[in-house]
Image: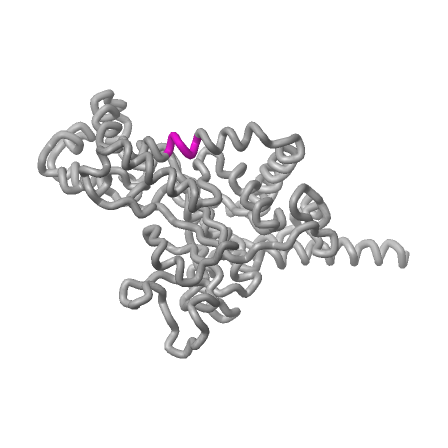
C-alpha cells in the first residue's frame, strides 16, 4: 500500500510539474492562418511576475479546464526525461549551456509571431530582460524612467519592428542569436490581404477582383506598400530602383545570410524550432506551442479564389526581390535538413506527437 501511494505521489508530482511549465506564459493563440497571438507578456522593458498581459487570462483559462478535467497526462511525462542531441530535460545531464541572448524579427503573416511567442515565453520563464522598440525614444528602445541599467543589459528582442542593426547593436553581442521566418510571398500576401480585410475596399467598388487590385491605378499606393514586404521588414531600403536591381538584392541577401543564424521557411516551422532549440541548447518544453483558433476556409475572401494566372504573374513581377529572398533561404534550409541525422528526425517525430497531445488536452468544446 505504501509503495503504491509513493508511486501515485511521484506520478502526480510529475503531472503538476508539466502543468506548471505550461501555465507560465505557455499557451498561445493560433490566428487565422496559423499564427500565434496573445503571447506578449511584456508591458515594459523588464519582465516581472506581475506584468502578465490581460490577453493571457484566456490562455490560463484553457489550462484551468485541463486541470479540472480527467485527462490522462501520463503519456506526456516522458517529456521530463527524454534526451536528444544538444540539450536534455535536466540540467545535471545537459552537455551545453543554454543561450539567452536572442533577436527574433517579426514579419507580418510569416509565422514569426509564433516564433516570437516561444522566445518571449522563454524570456518570461527565465526572467530575462526584453528590449521593446519605441519610435519616441532616441535609442529606439523603450526605457522605463526608473531603469538605470545600461541598454547592454537587455537580452531579448522579439517584438514587431523592422530589422535595424544600428538599434540592435546597442545591446547585442557576438553571442546573440538572430532568427526569423519567411514565407512563400504570394501565400503571405493572401494571408495579409485577408487579415487586414483589404478585400472590403474592393467590394466597395462593386464586383472587383484581385485583377482589379493589381491593374487599376487607384490601388497603386497599396500595391507599392505591399510589394517585397518581407525584404522591407528585414531592413532593405524602400527604393523601387534598388528592388529591381538583382545584383543589389543578391548582395543584401548575402548580408542577411551572414548576420542571421537561421531563417525558417514557414512550411518547415517545426523543423526550424528543433534546429533553434539545438542551436540555443534549450529543452523541448521551451519550444512547445499550442494551435488554437486555426483559420478556416470560410474566413478566406472569395477574392482569393480567382486563381487568375495574370494576378500571379503581376504579383511575381512586383515582388521579385521577395522571391529571391524566399528561394535563397528555403534552398539553404532544405540543405540543412538534408545534413541532419536520424536523431534529428526522431526528435521531430516526437515533437509533432507532443504538440498533438498537448492540443488534444486543450480542446475547448
Residue 1 shows up from this direction: yes
Residue 32 shows up from this direction: no
Q: Is residue 68 above or below residue 201?
A: below
Image coordinates for residue 35, horizontal then vertical, percent: 42, 44
Direction from residue 327 to residue 340 in the image, left or right: right
Q: Residue furthest left?
A: 217
Q: Residue at x 35, y 35 (%)?
A: 325
- In this orientation, which residue lies closer to the viewer: 341 or 119? 341
Q: Which region is colored magenta?
A: 326-330
Direction from residue 219 to residue 272 in the image, left or right: right
Was residue 117 drawn as part of the magenta stretch in this picture? no
Q: Residue furthest bottom?
A: 146
- In this orientation, which residue lies closer to the viewer: 214 or 84? 84
What is the magenta segment's predominant secondary structure? Answer: helix
Residue 180, quarter of picture: top left
- In this orientation, which residue lies closer to the viewer: 31 or 264? 264
- In this orientation, which residue lies closer to the viewer: 228 or 284? 228
Residue 201, quarter of picture: top left
Amino acid at each position: 500500500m505504501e509503495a503504491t501511494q509513493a508511486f501515485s505521489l511521484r506520478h502526480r508530482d510529475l503531472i503538476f510539474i508539466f502543468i506548471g511549465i505550461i501555465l507560465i506564459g505557455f499557451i498561445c493563440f493560433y490566428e487565422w492562418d496559423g499564427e500565434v497571438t496573445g503571447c506578449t507578456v511584456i508591458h515594459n522593458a523588464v519582465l516581472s511576475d506581475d506584468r502578465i498581459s490581460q490577453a493571457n487570462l484566456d490562455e490560463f483559462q484553457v489550462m484551468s479546464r485541463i486541470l479540472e478535467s480527467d485527462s490522462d497526462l501520463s503519456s506526456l511525462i516522458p517529456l521530463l526525461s527524454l534526451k536528444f542531441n544538444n540539450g536534455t530535460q535536466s540540467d545535471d545531464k545537459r552537455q551545453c549551456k543554454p543561450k539567452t541572448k536572442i533577436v527574433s524579427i517579426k514579419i507580418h503573416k510569416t509565422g514569426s509571431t509564433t516564433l516570437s511567442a516561444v522566445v518571449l515565453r522563454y524570456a518570461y520563464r527565465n526572467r530575462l530582460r526584453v528590449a521593446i522598440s519605441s519610435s519616441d525614444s532616441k535609442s529606439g528602445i523603450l526605457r522605463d524612467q526608473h531603469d538605470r541599467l545600461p541598454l547592454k543589459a537587455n537580452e531579448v528582442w522579439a517584438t514587431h519592428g523592422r530589422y535595424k542593426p544600428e538599434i540592435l547593436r546597442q545591446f547585442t553581442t557576438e553571442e546573440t542569436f538572430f532568427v526569423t521566418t519567411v514565407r512563400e510571398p504570394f501565400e503571405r500576401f493572401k494571408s495579409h490581404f485577408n487579415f487586414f480585410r483589404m478585400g472590403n475596399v474592393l467590394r466597395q467598388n462593386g464586383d472587383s477582383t484581385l485583377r482589379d487590385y493589381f491593374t487599376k491605378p487607384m490601388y497603386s499606393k497599396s500595391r507599392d506598400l505591399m510589394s517585397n514586404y518581407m525584404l522591407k521588414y528585414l531592413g532593405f531600403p524602400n527604393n523601387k530602383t534598388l528592388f529591381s536591381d538583382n545584383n543589389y538584392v543578391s548582395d543584401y541577401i548575402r548580408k542577411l545570410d551572414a548576420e542571421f543564424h537561421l531563417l525558417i521557411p514557414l512550411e518547415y516551422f517545426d523543423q526550424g524550432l528543433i534546429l533553434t532549440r539545438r542551436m540555443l541548447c534549450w529543452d523541448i518544453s521551451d519550444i512547445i506551442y499550442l494551435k488554437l483558433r486555426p483559420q478556416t476556409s470560410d474566413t478566406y475572401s472569395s477574392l482569393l479564389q480567382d486563381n487568375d494566372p495574370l494576378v500571379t504573374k503581376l504579383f511575381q513581377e512586383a515582388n521579385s526581390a521577395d522571391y529571391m529572398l524566399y528561394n535563397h533561404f528555403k534552398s539553404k534550409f532544405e540543405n540543412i535538413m538534408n545534413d541532419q541525422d536520424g536523431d534529428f528526425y526522431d526528435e521531430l517525430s516526437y515533437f509533432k506527437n507532443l504538440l498533438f497531445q498537448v492540443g488534444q488536452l486543450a480542446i475547448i468544446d
